[in-house]
Image: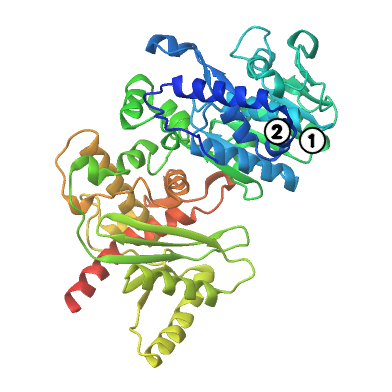
Amino acid sequence: MPIPFAFDFKRPDYLAAFEWRVERLQRIRKNPGVIPGMKAFYRDNPAQFIIDWGVTFDPRNAERGLPTLVPFLLFPRQEEWVAWFMERWKAQEDGITEKTRDMGMSWLTMSMSCTVCLFQPQISVGCGSRKEEYVDVIGDPDSLFEKGRIFLQNLPAEFRGGWDRKLHASYMKLQFPESGSILSGEAGDGIGRGGRASFYIVDESAFLARPQLVDASLSQTTNCRQDISTPNGRANSFAERRHGGKVKVFTFHWRDDPRKDQAWYDKQVERLDPVTVAQEIDIDYSASVEGVLIPSAWVQAAIDADKKLGIEITGALGGALDVADEGVDLNAFGVSRGVRIEHLESWSGKGDDIFGTVQRAFRISDDRGVAAFMYDADGLGAGVRGDSRVINEQRVNKGSSVIRVSPFRGSGAVYDPEGEMVKERKNKDFFANAKAQAWWSLRTRFQKTYRAVVEGMDYSMDDLIVIPGDLPERVKLVSELSQPTYTINAVGKIVIDKAPEGSRSPNHADTVMILFQPGHRALDVWAALAA
């Protein structure tokens, strides 16, 4: 159930929210018999409780002529996060939330935790951060527990469950007398030492000084550990677990926040250094890693680049299939029209075989009007050729058109070996294999798009790349595109490491790489001429 009245997050008018709450509270007080049913509802719907009765505090509102204490009206992605969090708790499994800075996550986590403690009987919740002053400084709303106190003391008395700040809000501890639940705080190496917890939230987990101690403690403390953080490079426990494939991940990107737009982002780019923008705004774990192939700023410039440049997308449709090469990986299929990525979707191949994967690729091709696609022919993808031949024979027997399926062998020789993708360097002398050439070609597209969008340089439309802002699975793609790194081997050729430091294979980015690899573009042209 969303916000029950029209609300503009960019130009907020909180009067309607206050009036709605006052009117509803008056009706409740005239008929208090509805309160038990409402509490039962809020027990399973904490996001709605926050929307209906919660508050948040932002001193920056004073600069805009707004009250500093305002109704906490969740935007859709925040509601999704609360539901996702509750699913992890009910399933007794860990979770990781990666986020852009200034997304209101501290207020959201404390409001959600307090709501759960208000209505769930006899639970114990833990919350920790790297320093005590981040966890609790009484009277300082920058600290987590003071946020909780502000949230609780501004609830209607009917829903506070007898909570009293003087009686139930000691240092690093909030007690809930009606439910018998408790919310406790810890800091630094002491996180997880305070006893068993129904769930435990670790705030800014990527910045812990000694995460190995926290990992050991929490493994014995709770069955539902929830880490929330902006990235801090790849050399930490948070990044390792985020990319390890064993923990479910929720991404809070600035584009999910209706208060933020391209003008906001441009201002951050102007104010902050590139590494900070990439790491804390774009959620780029490789921001401080040497040899990043496609910097995050280039990727961001490509989002809705056609709209930014005022160009019309033209060109042939093409498809690409990346086959999962291990159990935790995902199959991915992408569609492009000219320089624009039109569609991207992924799915688990667990419990299925390569034939099922190829069948799905054919279905997507039919749905999207794709007459030909390429596939990663290395590893498990080698089986696609035979399966696609069988499927095409079946299509012919049914009177359907054949879909052309072509291999891309990243381990093979470069395309156009005598040509020069890099001036005065023949392709065969510059790239170690076709994979390195294809990734470098993709890098060049993003670089030219960045120069056109951000620096205003002249461009040829056919050299660009466009990521639609509403592309399905865009967040995953954007994160993966800045993951690969490059080095130069002993004979002076470019070598690509697409999964550095043990990170997972970037299936979404691999699919886009195949979509735009030089040989695919040539095949598209030939197919158009032959049609």
Q: Can residue 236 be seen in this view?
A: no
**Counting other residues with Cα less than 10 Å from the Cα at mark 1, is it few (<14), some (14-19), or many (20 or more)?**
some
Q: Name the quadrant containing residue 110.
A: top right
Instruction: Say how the picture is coloured.
Output: rainbow
Report x, y in % for residue 234.
56, 37
Dot 2 falls on a residue whose secondary structure is: helix
- Image mark for residue 198: 1
Q: What residue type is labelled 2?
A: Val
Circle 2 sits on which residue? 34
Left or right of 512 in this view: 164: right
Left or right of 116 in this view: 3: left
The quadrant of the image that shows the N terminus is top right
Of 341 and 377, which appears nearest the observer? 341
Which tag, 1 or 2, sits closer to the chain's start?
A: 2
Q: What residue is shown at x 75% (from left), y 15% (from top)? A: 172
Of 357 and 381, which appears nearest the observer? 357
Q: Name the quadrant containing residue 208.
A: top right
Q: How many marks?
A: 2
Inter-mark Cα distance, 1 to 2: 29 Å
Q: What residue type is labelled 1?
A: Ser
Dot 1 falls on a residue whose secondary structure is: loop
Q: What residue is shown at x 62% (from left), y 50% (from top)? A: 245
Question: Looking at this rendering, what residue extends furthest in the bottom direction?
Answer: 397
Report x, y in % for residue 298.
33, 39
Q: What residue is shown at x 77% (from left), y 7% (from top)? A: 166
Report x, y in % for residue 315.
21, 62
Q: Between tags 1 and 2, which lies in front?
A: 2
- Image mark for residue 59: none
Above/below status of 247 relative to 333:
above
Left or right of 284 in this view: 250: right
Of 404 and 40, which appears nearest the observer? 40
